[in-house]
Amino acid sequence: MHTKTNLKALTPQQVVSFVHDAGLPSFRARQLLHWIYEKCAHSIGEITEFSLALRKRLSVQSYLSNLTLLKRQTSEDGTEKFLFALEDGESIESVLIPDKNRLTLCISSQVGCGMGCLFCLTGTLGFKRNLKAYEIVDQGIAVSRIITPKRITHIVFMGMGEPLLNFDEVVDSLCRMTDLMKISKRRITLSTAGIVPRILELGGAGGSVRRTGPPPRMRAPRVNLAISLNAPTDKVRDMLMPINKTYPLKSLIDACRRFPLEPRRRITFEYVMLNGINDSAADAKRLIILLKGIPSKVNLIPFNPYHGCGFRRPLDETVLRFQQILLDAHMTALIRKSKGQDILAACGQLKAGYA
Ligand code: SAH
Ligand code: SF4
């Protein structure tokens, strides 16, 4: 066990205190944060801006933790999947998706997921534990380091886990990404299955949301919001996503309407298309009515099958018909080509080596 302080486990404010307590001038904190979050240093020894003596002195009482890369797989379409081990031996996956001049990293917020959505492989793992803010951010740091000189341009919280059930650590990680890694909040998207009170809190409705436990540690940056909607009626959504019984569609859509959006920003609605379940023309029409008045864009994701799952992907023509109905109603609707299917890196296929 480490008795030293893991500098990555500290918030920026705590790094300032650490530097102060160590009797160092305060600019050392800025340098440390720069080397950790922008230069992606693996160890204090790599911080060559510090004299050897200073590096040695800091190494006596502190260290930098790192994710351990266990496996890196590359798909035919260029998508890459990274399997990382955490310090306690648990593992998580992150997926890097190149698209034209974008390089999007899809990151995990929990080990496993307890939400039990029927169509999702991550859901079959159940919930193992929440990630710490630094374990979330470290996915970005580790992958940046691996792909240098290429740079991650976008981050999506669409890997393993339900980010809004790990609210404080996720908000802390968002602050570090925007303030320290210098990734614009407009290029970060958080996806949720619909934890209504936390959506309101994320939107800054703070005071009006009752919260159990301690008050939030910090204020969330206004990142993009995505909702895993997947069905236009409570009947079907109850069946697919158990969370809908706690927060049914009306409360979810109300929260979306209240979510503050900057000009020209929209809420993304993800809709996994399941053959014969939610893919009819009538479903498309219900979806139009449901989302009426919300600045939105709909991402249609044809179901990515995995072993042991009873659902099937609709025919391409069914997906196209569904999209056309939305387009005819002047909605923005994209069919998300599933990337990385051959390496189980597509939406809902992350399992991190758990048998
Ligand atoms: N828990 C959060 C973040 C994970 S995002 C959430 O659910 O929003 C994972 C996305 O992949 C979700 O939009 C989900 O609807 C989608 N998904 C899950 N399983 C899938 C599958 N088998 N095929 C296609 N998309 C899937
Ligand atoms: Fe969890 Fe999201 Fe998968 Fe549902 S879709 S089981 S919330 S990761």
Image: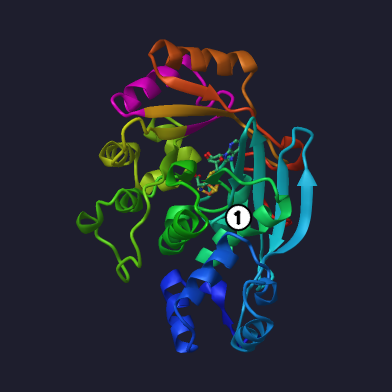
Q: Nearer the viewer, residue 194 or 202?
A: 202
Residue pictured at 45% horizontal, 31% vertical: 231
The amino acid marked with disc number 1 is Gly
Query: In the picture shown, does residue 103 fall above or below 147?
Result: above
Residue pictured at 67% horizontal, 52% vertical: 351
Q: Residue 274 lies in magenta, yes or no?
A: yes
User: Viewed as shown, does residue 212 lie left or right of 44?
Assistant: left
Q: Nearer the viewer, residue 108 or 141?
A: 141
Residue at far left of view: 208
Q: Nearer the viewer, residue 19 or 267?
A: 19
Q: Give, as a single range, the part of the protein colored magenta.
A: 270-295
Query: In the picture shown, does residue 96 fall above or below 333?
Result: below
Q: Nearer the viewer, residue 228 or 245?
A: 228
Give the labeled residue for mark 1. 140
Residue 127, visible in the rendered structure: no
Q: Residue 71 lies in magenta, yes or no?
A: no
